[in-house]
Amino acid sequence: MTADFAPEQVTAAAAAYNTLTPHPGHPRTHTQVSALFGVLPLVPPGVVKVTEWRPSLAEPLPTARRPLRRPGPHSGTPAMTMASA
């Protein structure tokens, strides 16, 4: 989450989120996120907004045959995985 593009909105959203969770989020700048990769080479387009990362795909993404389910605390059923589908 970066405040580079909408600082007021992101700061407000982070503050609201942090009141609801014991694991607070911290907005980072583009420079801070880029520094996480250190000396690793980045493939184009590099560190960009998620909407700019892969604006178009040559082929559509594969879809699952059935949706995956996660067991609820009271469901009494094991999780279904692709291996068991």
Image (cartoon, grey):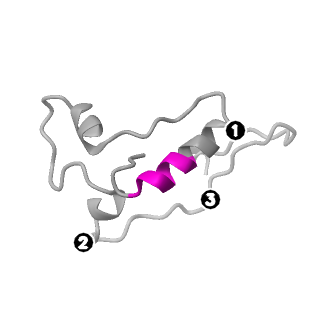
Q: Earlier in the sequence, mark 2 or mark 1?
A: 1
Q: Is residue 21 above or below residue 58?
A: above
Instruction: Tell me where residue 38 appears, x and y as whole percent.
Output: 18, 29
Left or right of 23: which side holds 74? right
Say which of 5 and 63 sits in front.
5
Q: Which residue is mark 1?
A: 20
Which comes sooner in the sequence, label 1 or label 3?
1
Q: CA distance from mark 2 to mark 1?
A: 40 Å
* Amino acid at circle 3: Pro
Amino acid type shown at disc 1? Leu
Q: CA distance from mark 1 to mark 3?
A: 29 Å
Q: Mark 3 = which residue?
A: 67
Question: How many residues crowd around disc 2 within 10 Å: few (fewer than 14), some, or many (20 or more)?
Answer: few
Looking at the rendering, the stretch of residues picked out in magenta corresponds to: 6-13
Quadrant position of residue 65: bottom right
Answer with mark 3 or mark 2, whichever residue precedes in sequence: 2
Q: Give left or right: position of 75 versus 69.
A: right
Q: Kindly identify the amino acid type of the residue bearing the numbered disc 2.
A: Ala
Local SS, label 1: loop
Disc 2: which residue = 58
